[in-house]
Image: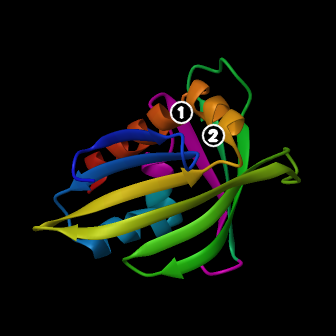
Amino acid sequence: MSADGIVIDEQTNTLTITRRYSAAAGRVWAAWTDPVAVARWWGPHGWTTTVERMDVRPGGQWRFSMTPDDGSADAVHIVVTYREVRPHQHLGYVDQFASEDWTIIGDGTPTDVTFTADGTGTRVAIAAVFADGEALQRGVASGMGEGYQEALERLGTIL
C-alpha cells in the first residue's frame, strides 16, 4: 500500500490507516514510544491525551485517557497491552476500553503498527483487526479510522 489513507477490508475485518513521514524510522518510533511525545499527538483533533503509564515491552501496558478540549464528553480510558515489540519496525498490541479505575471493558482490538523505510522517510501502517464484520462496521461508524488519521496528522507536526 503506497498511498496515505484509510482502507476497510471486509474480507479480513481489518481497518488499515497509513501515512508517510519525512523522518527516519528511529525518530518516528521514538514518537510512538515516549510518553511525553505521545501525549503531544495521540488522538483526534480537539482531544487531549494524558498518559498514565507506558511500558513498551511484550506484556507491558500503556494506559491513557483522552478528553475532548471543549468538555463535551467524559474522558475515554484505554488500556493497550503490548504483544510484540520490535524496535523501529513493529508494535503489536490489543487496545481495550477501560473504566476510570483502569478495569478493562470488553475484548479489545488486536492492532499492528509497522514502521517501514520509504525512501528517505518512514511509512507507518496501523492495522486494527476486528472480531467480525459487525465489529468492523461499529469501528468504522464510530470514526475510528478518521480518529487515527487525525492522530497521524498530528504526529507529522512534531516530527
| Residue nearest the observer in this picture, 135 or 153 | 135
State yes or no: residue 147 in magenta.
no
* Disc 2 and disc 1 in contact, CB within 8 angstroms: yes
- Residue 56 visible in rendering: no
Image quarter of residue 118: bottom left
Q: For this view, does 80 lie left or right of residue 150?
A: right
Which residue is label 1 attached to? 47
Specify the segment rendered in magenta.
39-59
Residue at point 85%, 44% (across, down): 99
Residue at point 65%, 21% (across, down): 71
- Label 2's element? strand
Q: Residues within 10 Å of mark 1 (few under 14, many from 20)?
A: some
Q: Amino acid at mark 2?
A: Met
User: Looking at the picture, how far across and down is residue 113, in whole percent?
Assistant: 46, 63
Q: For this view, does 152 lie left or right of residue 55?
A: left
Which residue is label 2 attached to? 66
Q: Residues within 10 Å of mark 2 (few under 14, many from 20)?
A: many
The quarter of the rendered structure image containing the C terminus is bottom left
